[in-house]
Image (cartoon, rainbow, N blue to C red):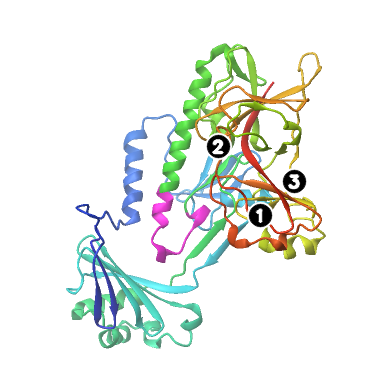
Amino acid sequence: PVEHFQIFIGSKGFGGSAPQTGDTKPENYIVDRNFVTAALSRYANETLKSSEYYNAMYETEMLYVDHENHRVLVRNKRTREEEYISYDLLVGADGIRSTVREALVKKHYDFELSVGDIFNSFKAVHIARPDALSHESMSLLPNCFPCCNGIVLPETGDLVNISIGANHNDFDTNVPYELKSDDPAVVCAYLKKNLKAFKLTDEGYMDFATQWVNQRWNRTGMVHCNRYSSAECKIVLMGDAAHATSPSIGMGMNTALRDAQKLYELLEKLWSVTAALLRQGQALSFDGGDHHKPSVTRRATLSTLSTALLMPGIALAADERSFRHYPSIRFISALGDPKSSCGTGSELWGLWRDDPGPRGVYLKDYERRLKSNNNVAPAGWTFDPTDWWVEEHGLIMSTPEPLPRKSINKETKEIIAEKQYVVTGDREVTTVLTVRDNGTWELEKGTLYDVTHLPCRSAAYRGDTCAPQNADLKSFPVKPGAEMPVIKGCEKQDYAVLFVLGEVV
């Protein structure tokens, strides 16, 4: 546990105990991530070794992801033998230089990522804890050496981890040459003279110096992606492969574990959906399967992860209908009374067949990425200056197509003047929405509010004097449930956003 925080300015230490609310002691812990990884591996080996679905492949490296055929090429590090392994769902938790992530780069032209350095060079040593430091304290060492900052973390065995680094811009000219020496004696002498925060024993200084010179200067990176999954590739990115942060934040392992927790929760939700579908017997089947038995298995539903994850308990009426799921989630822009379960005006509703967010352009980038390119977005859609859409983060989106309100009878090929969609707000209600050619609409269960995804906001901005340059960027992002901001010179129309999982056929 971490109960004390210290900052050393030269030889002066400042700090105190972690803040406490009432009688509740803070729960702050520093855990070596290698211990966490080892514990997880041991648990898997002990509890899953008899499972037909578990096969541990240590000392194996991934070389390539064949996303079109859903298989990976791996190599055994000991035997150097290579083989292809097929997958239903590939979880890419393979770090900053992710091999799995490359599949999304190749498959999706709208997939964007940046891999950058924290712009620091650093070294870390593990030495016996100095007397000046508590075994329950975390310490910061600002400017501990010229142009260098450090951090000290407690470790097991009464050791501490001391990491010290410098900005790349200072490294060549301002970092003391002694710290760049490969002679332990030189480094040791420098430490004795210049490390003011705490004293070490003679053995401690030499241990510090020896570890210091026996390692290269380390660098680490940060990763930002605009999406973490691909239904087509059957891939989910997690941990550093998806969102590596600076180690100075100290949250890398925490966010990775949070990713694992959320994936588990989503898979549990998915499996409960599958079980519910199986229980319905003749009431429901996936399109193309036996209408007397749902063609659903755990493997099949895993392959449709991106859509089924958002199905919190679909239950269609028991009147022998078939549900065709979409390869990826679609989005309806809807107008109507949030408290109503039926109404008119669906001829004004729209449909995005792909998530418009990742394909959008930020308001602040309008001049550079839209106007300068004849109003054609990098993703290929065309911007209409007199009728344009914005989502809650300030992204200009493509205009949705009119929502289809007719369907075709599969057997007779007759055109039916209505269409039924399976919709959800990713909360409690998943139901069937019927829209008709005459503009009326109806939900089998719940209200329009119940199937609205509250975090998603969208609005159309229209008018001859309406321009993205007039938007107040400080108004974004918009809080869930709040109205979209007014933009000077524009007529604004807010729309509810519904997730569309598929349609009744």
Q: Which residue is mark 3?
A: 399
Q: Which residue is mark 1?
A: 486
Mark in front: 3 vs 1: 1
* Residue 29 occupies quadrant: bottom left
- Which sits earlier in the primary sequence, circle 3 or circle 1? 3
Cα distance between the residues tagged 1 and 2 = 48 Å
The residue closer to the viewer here, 34 or 441, is 441
Give yes or no for contact between labels 3 and 1 (Cβ–Cβ under 8 Å). Answer: no
- 394 relative to 427, above or below: below
Three-letter amino acid code at the position of disc 1: Val
> Is 247 colored magenta in this rendering?
yes
Three-letter amino acid code at the position of disc 2: Tyr
Q: Residues within 10 Å of mark 2 (few under 14, many from 20)?
A: some
Mark in front: 1 vs 2: 1
Q: Which residues are magenta?
A: 240-257
Position in image of residue 262 (x %, y %): 45, 42
Q: Which residue is mark 2?
A: 87
Position in image of residue 145 (x %, y %): 35, 83
